[in-house]
Image (tube, rainbow, N blue to C red):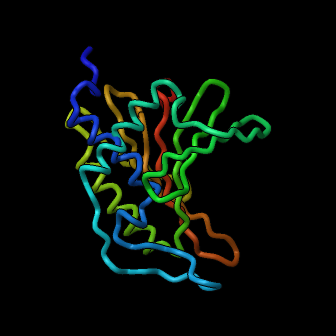
């Protein structure tokens, strides 16, 4: 079987997809950033370098094969999980490597103030990721339980390798939504 990552163009395309999800705010052209004591939504358009995003996503999918070993730094140990810091933050922060036993995932997350802002970020991230993935990859929408959000899985040869999710994470006093990008090691199919 020919490797999807042999072609430089495809490598560039895949790298971008992983980074886009966490920076859904950047990708969608909307940024949610704390300003002093108040949080405000900035609605100015941002320029997205599609080639750079695709290159970064391709790098992440390639590095997933070895558990992201060259981008993991400073582990924090918890009960059954190790969370590794990483300097590889193409989406402006919020990304880390999670490890359960010998399984690894690159995870980016961005908390947004409401469903509308999260939907804008999610849709734009999906559009950009879709432009990066080669035609041999497939996308599949998956319904989350209890209507708590949306999920798009990215697969090659029937194996899920990543996903973009928009999930309601608010509680009694907040209406927050979180956009996640997950890229898993090849053996971590879902």
Residue 40 position within the rendered picture, expressed as x and y whole percent measured from the top left: 51, 83
Instruction: Give the answer, above or below, for where 110 lies relative to 65.
Output: below
Which residue corresponds to the image point at 34% horizontal and 71% vertical from the top-left?
29
Instruction: Give the answer, above or below, for where 16 lies relative to 146.
Output: above
Residue situated furthest right in the rendering:
79
Q: Quadrant of the N terminus?
A: top left
- Residue situated in front as seen by the camera: 119 or 8: 8
Residue situated furthest top in the rendering:
1
Residue 125 position within the rendered picture, expressed as x and y whole percent measured from the top left: 35, 58
Q: Quadrant of residue 148?
A: bottom right
- Residue situated in front as seen by the camera: 178 or 57: 57
Instruction: Give the answer, above or below, for where 190 lies relative to 125.
Output: above
Q: Quadrant of residue 9?
A: top left
Residue 173 position within the rendered picture, expressed as x and y whole percent measured from the top left: 69, 78
Which residue corresponds to the image point at 43% horizontal and 75% vertical from the top-left?
116
Q: Is residue 148 visible?
A: no
Which residue corresponds to the image point at 43% horizontal and 52% vertical from the top-left?
90
Instruction: Give the answer, above or below, for where 128 lies relative to 39.
Output: above
- Describe residue 18's horizontal placement relative to residue 139 as left or right: right
Q: Is residue 165 visible?
A: yes
| Number of marks | 0
Residue 89 position within the rendered picture, expressed as x and y whole percent measured from the top left: 48, 51
């Amino acid at each position: 079987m020919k490797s999807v990552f042999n072609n430089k163009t495809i490598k560039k395309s895949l790298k971008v997809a992983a980074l886009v999800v966490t920076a859904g705010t950047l990708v969608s052209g909307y940024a949610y950033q704390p300003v002093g004591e108040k949080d405000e939504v900035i609605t100015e358009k941002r320029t997205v370098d599609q080639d750079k995003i695709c290159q970064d996503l391709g790098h992440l999918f390639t590095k997933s094969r070895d558990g992201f070993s060259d981008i993991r730094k400073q582990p924090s140990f918890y009960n059954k999980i190790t969370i590794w810091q990483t300097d590889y933050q193409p989406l402006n922060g919020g990304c880390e490597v999670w490890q359960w036993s010998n399984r690894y995932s690159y995870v980016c997350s961005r908390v947004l103030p409401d469903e509308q802002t999260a939907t804008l970020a999610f849709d734009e991230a999906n559009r950009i990721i879709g432009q990066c993935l080669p035609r041999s990859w497939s996308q599949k929408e998956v319904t989350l339980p209890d209507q708590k959000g949306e999920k798009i899985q990215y697969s090659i040869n029937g194996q899920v390798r990543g996903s973009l999710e928009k999930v309601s994470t608010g509680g009694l006093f907040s209406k927050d939504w979180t956009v996640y990008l997950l890229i898993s090691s090849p053996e971590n199919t879902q």
